[in-house]
Image (cartoon, grey):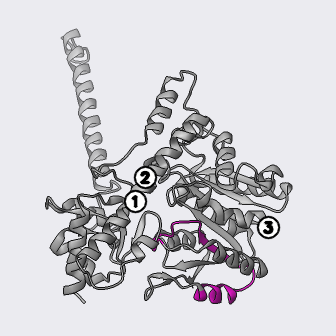
Amino acid sequence: MRPEFASPSSSSSSSADRRLNALVRHLATASMVSQTAVAFSPTSGFHGDSVFSHVVRAPEDPILGVTVAYNKDPSPVKLNLGVGAYRTEEGKPLVLNVVRKAEQMLLNDKSRVKEYLPIVGIAEFNKLSAKLIFGADSPAIRENRVTTVQCLSGTGSLRVGAEFLARHYHQKTIYIPQPTWGNHPKVFTLAGLSVKTYRYYDPTTRGMNFQGLLEDLGSAPSGSIVLLHACAHNPTGVDPTLQQWEQIRQLMRSKALLPFFDSAYQGFASGNLDEDAQSIRMFVADGGECFVAQSYAKNMGLYGERVGALSVVCRAADVASKVESQLKLVIRPMFSNPPIHGASIVVTILKDSNMFNEWTIELKAMADRIISMRKQLFDALRARGTPGDWSHIIKQIGMFTFTGLNSKQVEFMTREYHIYMTSDGRISMAGLSSKTVPHLADAIHAAVTRMT
């Protein structure tokens, strides 16, 4: 065989070698690339701490943190009086019968879909919510001076209203009562408003500091925003009388102060929907402007459904229309549009007269049970001869009682009696039952007599 000519088998072998060598080179290159990729992967340089190592652990929410501590306690006699959620006499969460009925109707309606709602929510929900809070015969509704948008319960309604005011209102200061719900200052501050307080509660009488309220609002700059609890003030349970509300209204209108009502307990305080809305309706009746945040968490028990509404009462219909257009611009980048299910429950109940009546009966039963708990606790403390005047327990109204207990006494009750409440001495009357009242009364008596 001449050397310049290879045999067919030799040629085939050489070709195979070349392919094999090419494959080896390819694999070697791929391995180098892979090693390089590993060496320079986005996380490969962080062999030590996280880029978030500097983040400080936040404290528990003062209200929700009570439940966290309660859940960790193995004691069989523990009692959670911290969170504002209704409980039955057996200490269980309650879903209203009328709510279950409404949900079943929605489930059976095969025409229902899960499409996005408009930015402002369900139109019928907004119309019925305005009617519920302002009254069916409200001139503001009749004259189209009200714009209502569906929001994420009371908190979301407050936040949307606050963001609108921060953008479009000439005064950036809001006055809130001292004390108030712990989330209020956070909501308004993060929305861009400056928060100041006005006197409201008198710890010596465990009642209202009405003179202090009038003085503080009287000295507030003209045009300031004022947060008002429509009824069942949280955390004190102390409400102005109708005569006092009228004085507040006259003072605020004379100084062009803008009312922003937080209505979290309509019907839940007195058991009467109209009675609990009287303060708001007084301000609407004079033709002036106001904001109202509404929640269905308490009065329909729709806590986790996050159902609420923000209403803005304006002086003219064209102004209300323009305000709504700007509220859309607040809502769209915040949560785009509201959820459909909870608001559909509300619509189903409010638009049907029989279901509405059934709701009012169940609502009054909840309010009456809370009033009964107040009476039982007052009687139990009096029977034990607990030092002090405890009449404020039956004078206050709504879900909460501001007991007047100090933080040391609260800590003592938690440690010795496994009773959980916020450190300011606020207790949720809705968390009590006839079975647990004696335990609470024993704890209060011991705290007052031993932890002065």
The N terminus lies in which quarter of the figure?
top left
Residue closer to the observer: 442 or 391: 391
Q: Say which label, 3 or 1, has the lower sequence index.
A: 3
Q: Position of residue 373 (x, y in %)?
A: 35, 62
Numbered range of the magenta stretch: 211-237
Amino acid of disc 3:
Asp
Q: Is residue 53 visible?
A: no
Q: Quadrant of residue 81?
A: bottom left
Residue 407 percent coordinates (x, y): 30, 82
Q: Residues within 10 Å of mark 3 (few under 14, many from 20)?
A: few
Residue 38 on image: x %, y %: 28, 51
Residue 92: image location, x then y, percent: 30, 49
Q: Residue at x 39, y 55 (%)?
A: 369
Element carrying mark 2: helix
Does 204 appear above or below 428?
Answer: below
Residue 444 sits inside the magenta stretch: no
Q: Are marks 2 and 1 in contact (CB under 8 Å)?
A: yes
